[in-house]
Image (cartoon, rainbow, N blue to C red):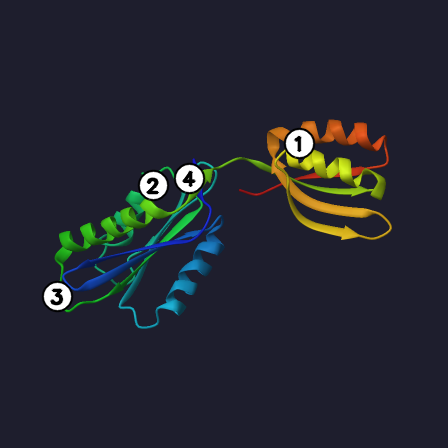
Amino acid sequence: MLIPTQRAEAEIEVKRSRFIAIAIPTDTMEKVREAVLSVRAEHPGATHVVHAAVIGKAGTMYSSSDDREPKNTAGRPALEVVKGSGITNITVAIVRYFGGTLLGTGGLVKAYGDSAKEVLKVVPTETLVEKTGFRMVLPYSSYTQIKRLFESLSVTIDKEDFDISIAIEGFLPSDSAPILKEHVDDIGQGRILLDFRTLKS
């Protein structure tokens, strides 16, 4: 599965109606709700803000809404496009500004499906890699070696606190966690504290 790395936007026009599709990285249903509310706030004059979301490591959790468009003419066709894309942890919100001409059921299905396709063409993605979080407390004397180790294992640092000792929080690909532990034991000789935690998908 792929995941989006940042927000992307695309726009199409159908019979003077504007359809602005916005793809937003979201890894929980709560974040889906926040993303849709955020898009609504950005487009207070929009006629509709439809959404389709796929969540979870296997891409098996879904959310969609027609937002007052006729049933199954908006959120459903957009969701089918997103489901078929191989991208998870994504919300596609489609903003419609009505252009004065009714599109009919088939026209709506096509317009919302095409909008989702357009934004998925431009959204940057990366492969979904299972990650493990960690917290480490180490002496200053080990810091340079540990930083070098982090670079070799694609570690992402969330937080560093420099006090009597150094406390670091971050995450790394799960299959690199045993290697991190082995090298930390080697470098620290029992003077480095390392705790792992599971990250939610």
At x 13% / y 59%, what residue is drawn? 103
Res. 176 in view:
yes
Res. 139 in view:
no
At x 55% / y 35%, what residue is drawn? 130
* Mark 1 surroundings within 10 Å by alpha-carbon count, few (fewer than 14), some (14 through 19), many (20 or more): some
The amino acid sitting under disc 1 is Ala
Dot 2 or dot 1: first in sequence order is 2
Tell me the quadrant of the picture where the N terminus can be found.
top left
* Mark 2 surroundings within 10 Å by alpha-carbon count, few (fewer than 14), some (14 through 19), many (20 or more): some
Dot 2 or dot 3: first in sequence order is 2
23 above or below 15?
above
Q: Is residue 140 left or right of residue 87?
A: right
The answer to whether mark 4 and mark 3 are in CB contact below 8 A is: no
Disc 2 or disc 3, which is closer to the eye? Answer: 3
* Mark 4 surroundings within 10 Å by alpha-carbon count, few (fewer than 14), some (14 through 19), many (20 or more): some
Query: Looking at the picture, how far across and down is residue 156, in whole percent?
Result: 62, 43
Residue linked to disc 1: 177
Which of the labelled discs sits on residue 59, or is there none? 4
Location of residue 198 (image quadrant): top right
Marks 2 and 3, Cα distance to the nearest angstrom?
Answer: 29 Å
At x 80% / y 31%, what residue is drawn? 187
Query: Looking at the picture, how far across and down is residue 61, in whole percent?
Result: 42, 44
Query: Looking at the picture, how far across and down is residue 155, in whole percent?
Result: 64, 39
Q: Is residue 33 left or right of residue 195?
A: left
Marks 2 and 1, Cα distance to the nearest angstrom?
Answer: 31 Å
Q: Secondary structure at mark 4?
A: loop
Disc 4 or disc 1, which is closer to the eye? Answer: 1
Which of the labelled discs sits on residue 83, or is there none? 2
